Image (cartoon, rainbow, N blue to C red):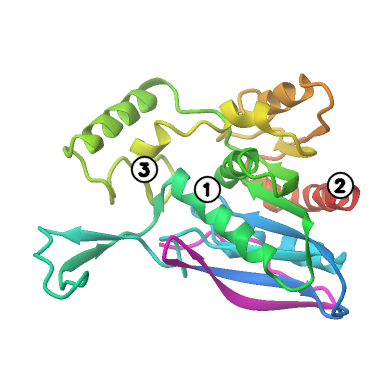
């Protein structure tokens, strides 16, 4: 499959990038760490983990990560499992033969690719947080999470369950659960999967309009970032596209902001960039969106 093409990264002066591997549940995730070029050994810097959306990769967030690093932060971008340069879950093909040598057997497997599995994505985000927490010069008390599009919902879900996240910034986030006929199909997929009547790792079925890959509907039936929003207790920035055609902002980012603002003591900022569609956030919306996120980190990390 072809990755969406975004404006190229022009690496800021004084920023370095290193390719690393984040291990999540035994799967190797392709990742990059962005750091200021000059850091004293005893410096303790804030860090940000950045998550891409459906069909994206670590490169979706590279311009944002480089910008944050140019302001004195350490940033980590990663590609979700089964997409592009990251490893994949493996599915056994046929019956598992009897154990012949301890716990090792020879069998056939199927490599799962381009699967949109939200709970696996949330686990990968947690692993990325584990990785960055161990990165030299990172202050573990100042870690933020950034997410975009479907990855924005994953970021909110992950942050709601991880007290290491001290600030959150999401843009054009998918927050609402499935509804209508798609929700009904997802419930059927969940039931059939549990009963062994549908593939536990679907490939090439249930296509989503205008999107690459396979949605794991059995997982999506239970994935509801909006239901977790009232658990968020860190300063949260939500940036929406005024003409978002994929995730209506009143039901997604706007609704999440309302819930957050209703909780006494919460710090929330909701911004709408007018005149841009969903993917416009990476083009005409990049400058205001990225600068707002940077200002959020500088204020709250």
Residue corresponding to mark 2: 300
Give the quadrant of the N terminus.
bottom left
The answer to whether the residues at label 1 and label 3 have Cβ atoms under 8 Å apart is no
Residue 129 vertical placement versus 99 (above, below): above
Indicate yes or no whether the magenta region holds residue 71: no
Q: Residue at x 71, y 33 (%)?
A: 242
Q: Residue at x 59, y 44 (%)?
A: 158
**Residues at marks 1 and 2, CA–CA distance in whole angstroms:** 23 Å
Indicate yes or no whether the magenta region holds residue 3: yes
- Marks 3 and 2, the one that precedes in the sequence: 3
The residue carrying pointer 2 sits among few (fewer than 14), some (14 to 19) or many (20 or more) residues within 10 Å by Cα, namely some
The answer to which of 97 and 79 lies nearer the viewer is 97
| Disc 3 secondary structure class | loop
- Marks 1 and 3, the one that precedes in the sequence: 1
The answer to whether the residues at label 1 and label 2 have Cβ atoms under 8 Å apart is no
Q: Is residue 11 left or right of residue 86?
A: right
- Marks 1 and 2, the one that precedes in the sequence: 1
Residue corresponding to mark 3: 216
Q: Residue at x 39, y 31 (%)?
A: 221
Q: Which residues are magenta?
A: 1-28
**Residues at marks 3 and 2, CA–CA distance in whole angstroms:** 35 Å
Q: Residue at x 73, y 27 (%)?
A: 257
Q: Which mark is residue 122?
A: 1
Q: Is residue 212 left or right of residue 150?
A: left
The residue carrying pointer 1 sits among few (fewer than 14), some (14 to 19) or many (20 or more) residues within 10 Å by Cα, namely many
Q: In the rendered image, which quarter is residue 185 located in?
A: top left
């Amino acid at each position: 499959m072809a990755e969406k093409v975004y404006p190229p990264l022009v690496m800021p002066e004084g920023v370095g990038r290193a390719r690393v591997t984040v291990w999540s549940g035994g799967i190797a995730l392709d990742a990059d760490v962005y750091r200021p070029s000059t850091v004293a050994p005893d410096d303790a810097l804030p860090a940000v983990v950045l998550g891409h959306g459906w069909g994206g990769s670590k490169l979706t967030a590279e311009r944002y990560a480089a910008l944050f690093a140019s302001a004195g932060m350490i940033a980590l971008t990663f590609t979700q499992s089964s997409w592009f340069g990251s490893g994949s879950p493996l599915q056994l093909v046929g019956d598992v033969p009897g154990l012949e040598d301890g716990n090792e057997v020879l069998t056939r497997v199927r490599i799962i690719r381009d699967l949109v599995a939200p709970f696996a994505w949330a686990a990968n985000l947690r692993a990325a947080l584990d990785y960055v927490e161990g990165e030299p010069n990172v202050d573990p008390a100042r870690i933020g999470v950034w997410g975009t599009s479907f990855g924005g919902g994953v970021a909110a879900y992950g942050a709601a369950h991880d007290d290491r996240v001290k600030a959150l910034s999401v843009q054009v986030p998918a927050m609402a659960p499935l509804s209508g006929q798609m929700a009904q199909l997802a419930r059927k997929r969940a039931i059939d999967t549990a009963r062994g009547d549908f593939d536990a790792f679907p490939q090439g079925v249930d296509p989503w309009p205008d999107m690459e890959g396979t949605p794991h509907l059995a997982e999506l039936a239970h994935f509801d970032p909006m239901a977790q929003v009232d658990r968020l207790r860190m300063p949260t920035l939500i940036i929406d596209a005024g003409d978002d055609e994929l995730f209506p902002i009143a039901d997604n980012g706007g609704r999440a902001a309302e819930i957050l603002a209703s909780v006494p003591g919460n710090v929330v900022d909701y911004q709408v960039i007018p005149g841009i569609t969903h993917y416009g956030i990476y083009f005409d919306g990049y400058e205001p969106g990225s600068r707002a996120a940077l200002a959020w980190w500088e204020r709250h990390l």
